[in-house]
Every structure is written in C-alpha cells, then in structure tokens.
Image (cartoon, rainbow, N blue to C red):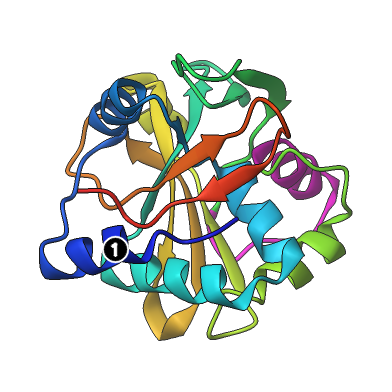
Amino acid sequence: MQINKEAECEIIKKPIKKNQKDWIDYFNNKREKMISASDIYKIAKKENKAIIGSLKKDFEESGEVTSTRIIYNKDNLNAEIIHDVDSKIVTSKKYKVKIPVFDGDFEENKEAEKYLQALFDTKDSIDKILKVFTKFGKDKKLRLWTPSQSSRGDKQVRSVELYFGNFGRFDVDGGSWFGGSGGLSRGVIISSAKQTKKLRGKSK
C-alpha cells in the first residue's frame, strides 16, 4: 500500500466530507474500491507507519467513513455485516452475527469477540484485535458503539466509521446513519495481475 502524496496535499487544502452512500458512488465512478473496516485492520497489522500516520489525520479531523455496512434486525440482536457494500469493483463479503448494544466501554467476552472478528474480517482473538488497534489509538483503549434496540427499530441500515473520540480513545462506530453528514474516506486500487492493494490519499 502506498499513499498518493499529491492527492493528500490536495485534500489538506480542501477536505471533502461525504456520507457512505455518496462515497460508494464516488469510488465506483473512479473504478476504485472504497476502503472497508477490514482494510483498516489489515493496514494496522502490517504496521506501515506512513499509512497509519496518514489515516490518523482522518480520524482526528472528522473520522473515516468505510464501505462496511451493518443491517440490524429491528426485533432482536441479529445483524448482517457487509464489507465493500454496493461496490462495482469487488465482490462484497457478508457475515451474519449477533451484535450487542455497545455504549463505549465494553466487556471483553465471546460476543464482543465474534462481533469484532466479523467487523474486521479476521479470525484473530479479541486480545490480538485490541492490540492491533493500539497502533492507531493515542490511548490503549478501544471503544465500541452500536445502536440501542429501539434505535435499530427506527433505522436498520447503518455505516461503520472510525475516529478518535474523547481523551484520544479510538472509537469504532457501528451505528452511523449511512445517509448522514459523513466524513473523509479513501480509495483502494486493486491490481488484478498481482492482487495487490495500494491505499491512495484522501480523495476530493
């Protein structure tokens, strides 16, 4: 993965914020894969300091809108997590999982582990996942946010956003309204020959 320095300079001058719906259309038109929550996890695991540092700027400024979507059940905790949702570039990947109501701090149990494994498309243990994300956090504490059951009844379709919250904690928000005000995002170029991925700079 490499950062497009020119694109990054352009966005620093004039950052453009979009919601998940608009970012998906934007990257489909550019023939690029929109970054997913699982892509961000892979970046942290590879420990590429340049890309991690660049993404931190997104997290600090307004948060990273990903192509990962959650469709909640209005009557219970069942949900479907979709990576690369509505992409015309790559095939979406889906997980069906029970998602508890998270309100920031959470208990590190099997339910939380299964949710995080699906959210980041990994078989890593919860201990490993939390350790990986310390690469981003200013504080060694990850916080999770998902809608209450009553809120799920009101709006089932949500987008996943990552950002720095209070006291520098790294927040993983699984309850953002996909048509809301939004934030920044990134495109991922897929090489069909080598199947490699290069992370571009923030897009205009």
Quarter occupied by the N terminus = bottom right
Residue 38 relative to residue 52: left or right: right
Q: Is residue 180 above or below residue 62?
A: above
The residue most toward the left is 14
Above/below status of 139 relative to 116: below
The residue located at (26%, 51%) in the rendering is 183
> Which residue lies at the image location 43% right of the left edge and 31% below the top edge?
32
* Residue 57 is a magenta residue: no
- Secondary-structure class at tag 1: helix
The residue stretch that appears in magenta = 103-119
Residue appearing at x 27%, y 70% in the figure? 61
Describe residue 101's horizontal placement relative to residue 156 as left or right. right
Residue 36 screen position, x and y as percent: 53, 40
Taking depth in this image into account, of 192 and 166 the one nearest to the observer is: 192
Q: Nearer the viewer, residue 80 or 202?
A: 202
Residue bearing the label numbered 1: 6
Of 153 and 19, nearer the camera is: 19
Image quadrant in which you'd find residue 147: top left
Task: Identify the residue shown where x is 28% and y is 26%.
Answer: 21
The type of residue carrying mark 1 is: Glu
